[in-house]
Amino acid sequence: MRPIVCRTLRREYRLHPPSDEVASLLRFVEAAPELPALPLEVLDIPVRFRDGFLAATLPSGELVEGTPNHVLSAMHRIILADLVEGEPGAPFLHGATVMIGGRRVLLVGHKGSGKSTLALHLALAGYDVEGDEHLVIRDSEVVARPRTLRVKEGSLHLVAKLPDQVWQAPSVHNWDGSIVRSISPAVGGRPWAIRPGRLDAMVFLVANHGGRSAARPIVSKDAFGRLMGEVMLPRTGVAAAAGRLRQVAVEVPAYQLLLGDLATAEWHLSSIASQLT
């Protein structure tokens, strides 16, 4: 049985489930993009049955016992801690990143704004989606955190021509009973790859469900205020991290996208990317 691979920006965690049934439940956390610029340390995590529950031995030596959801929660905690420890002093912007016409565009939006649904539409349209959760802001470059697209099943009807891979993607039940699917950005047939580089544009999404999509540029002061509402700052060096964020707001063109129909939203994003120098 192949292991479940969970990559971060510095490590590859490999979960070894005891059965195919358990593997199907834990595969929600799988994230295996190509990271050509990053050598990864490989860490194995054996998972076994114990008294009717699962027992996973973490790299720290900690033993996690419980349901598959307990193991998933432990992995999410490990992956986030790995990100924070590996990027000391860096701010993490909550957003999806996609390459459009060779330009890296950050899509920023509150929960319910349609960010993940738009990212799925773009992946199926043939664009290279890098990630759907965090963008690490380094001194001279940015890099997306490896994570699959997490799309509520109730939103999937907004995306046209869904392939079978979407409906077969791993899923969990959310706290409200809704189903959330974990969909690889490679679902559109393009390799899922993440490379450090420059950020070319930021697009702040405002939900307009059922309506039309429309875009307009916004000034750096407005962009900075919106970024501060979507950032995870480090515990120490907050001023320096905020300064780095301010620099991004000043240097990177920013836009607001009223997000309604996805096809028109795609057109606006392509138009924005084509105007970048």
Image (cartoon, grey):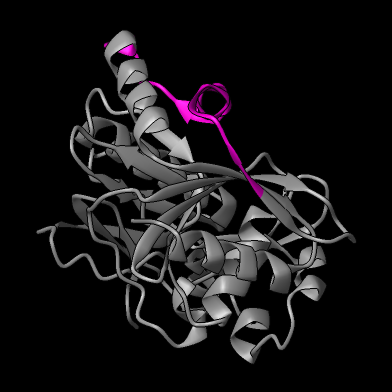
Asked whether residue 129 is drawn in magenta, I would say: no
Task: Give the percent coordinates (x, y) of residue 127.
Answer: 46, 75
Q: State the image quarter where residue 82 is shown.
A: top left
Above or below, comparing residue 188 to residue 37 in the picture:
below
Above or below, comparing residue 155 to residue 92 in the picture:
below
Tell me the quadrant of the picture where the C terminus can be found.
bottom left
Q: Is residue 3 left or right of residue 159?
A: left
Q: Nearer the viewer, residue 60 or 144?
A: 144
On the question of residue 158 being in view, the answer is yes
Q: Is residue 250 left or right of residue 124?
A: left
Q: Is residue 79 left or right of residue 220?
A: left
Task: Give the percent coordinates (x, y) of residue 77.
Answer: 43, 39
Tell me the quadrant of the picture where the N terminus can be found.
bottom left
Q: State the image quarter where residue 108 is shown.
A: top right
Above or below, comparing residue 142 to residue 68 in the picture:
above
Q: Is residue 30 left or right of residue 239?
A: right
Above or below, comparing residue 103 to residue 60 in the picture:
below
Residue ID at (39%, 64%): 31
Asked whether residue 218 is drawn in magenta, I would say: yes
Given the current orientation, which residue lies at the most extreme left position? 39
Q: State the image quarter where residue 225 is shown.
A: top right
Residue ID at (53%, 68%): 270
Task: Give, as a single range, the part of the protein colored magenta.
Answer: 216-238
On the question of residue 25 being in view, the answer is no
Task: Give the percent coordinates (x, y) of residue 36.
Answer: 15, 67
Q: Nearer the viewer, residue 99 or 119?
A: 99
